[in-house]
């Protein structure tokens, strides 16, 4: 088991629940609820600095069948923003299906209901998520979930694709120059250049999107 404090992040449409582990990675406890919107990333960054976190675990909500919907897409987008803000601090996505339901059940069992429950349910969901991630790492000996690639790396990848595209353009130009000598092959040289550009342009798109 790796040492160091981890933060658990449960992403909601209105609020973000935050939990933390002890330095030995055994137990998750609630920290606070952060309201979504302006300043949310800054507050999470401040919490990470305050607790000297070594890793962030963001919940990835999926259906019971493992399919991802709009909530999962929103969690992935938020995790990417955290990774960009806190780089090089590692950010991981971990399957959190049913964490909110589990959190509500635990709060009801503890006598917390109604408005009081709404104020802390996001924190409790973050606790459930982080504890599951800690237990999974302790059982498997491997970090939980999967790492979120910082947008800079995605940009580097797309840059490589653009480099490949440029090389294709140059190759296409050489084909066109060779074809000039024979005349009828001129069209084939132009087609070669266009084909070389196509894949590069397509791969550059996702890279640019990730960087945003």
Image (cartoon, rainbow, N blue to C red):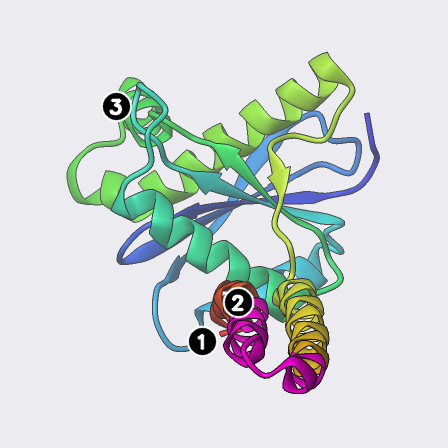
Instruction: Give the residue at mark 1.
Output: 39
Rendered residue at 20%/32% (across/down)? 113
What separation in Å lies between label 2 and label 1 (alpha carbons)? 45 Å
124 inside magenta stretch: no
- The 10 Å Cα crowd at callout 1, few under 14, some 14 to 19, many 20 or more, is few
**Regarding mark 3 in the picture, which secondary structure is present there?**
helix
Q: In this view, does 4 lie above or below 12?
A: above
Asked if marks 2 and 3 touch (Cβ < 8 Å), the reply is no
Is the C-beta separation of discs 1 and 3 under 8 Å? Answer: no
Residue 24 appears in which quarter of the rendering?
top right
The residue that mark 2 highlights is: 195
Find the magenta span and give its range: 176-197
Give x and y (percent) for residue 104: 28, 28
- Give the percent coordinates (x, y) of residue 101: 28, 26
User: Which is closer to the viewer, label 2 or label 1?
Assistant: 2
Q: Earlier in the sequence, mark 2 or mark 1?
A: 1
Question: Going from the N terminus, do you reach mark 2 or mark 3 first?
Answer: 3
Residue at figure coordinates x 68%, y 78% from the top left = 166
Q: In this view, does 129 lie above or below 183?
A: above
Chief secondary structure of the magenta portion: helix
**Which residue in the structure is indicated by mark 3?**
108
């Amino acid at each position: 088991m790796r040492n160091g404090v981890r933060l658990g992040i449960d992403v909601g449409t209105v609020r973000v629940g935050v939990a933390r582990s002890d330095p030995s990675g055994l137990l998750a406890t609630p920290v606070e609820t952060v309201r979504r919107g302006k300043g949310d990333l800054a507050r999470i960054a401040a919490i990470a600095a305050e607790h000297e976190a070594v890793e962030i675990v963001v919940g990835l909500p999926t259906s019971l069948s493992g399919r991802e919907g709009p909530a999962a897409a929103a969690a992935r987008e938020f995790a990417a923003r955290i990774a960009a803000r806190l780089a090089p601090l590692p950010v991981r996505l971990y399957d959190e299906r049913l964490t909110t339901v589990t959190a509500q059940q635990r709060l009801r069992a503890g006598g917390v209901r109604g408005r009081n429950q709404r104020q802390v349910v996001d924190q409790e969901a973050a606790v459930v998520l982080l504890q599951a991630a800690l237990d999974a790492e302790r059982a498997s000996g491997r970090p939980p979930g999967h790492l979120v690639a910082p947008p800079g790396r995605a940009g580097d990848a797309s840059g490589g694709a653009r480099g490949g595209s440029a090389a294709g353009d140059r190759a296409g130009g050489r084909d066109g120059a060779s074809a000039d000598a024979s005349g009828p092959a001129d069209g084939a040289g132009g087609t070669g250049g266009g084909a070389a550009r196509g894949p590069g342009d397509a791969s550059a798109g996702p890279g640019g999107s990730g960087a945003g």
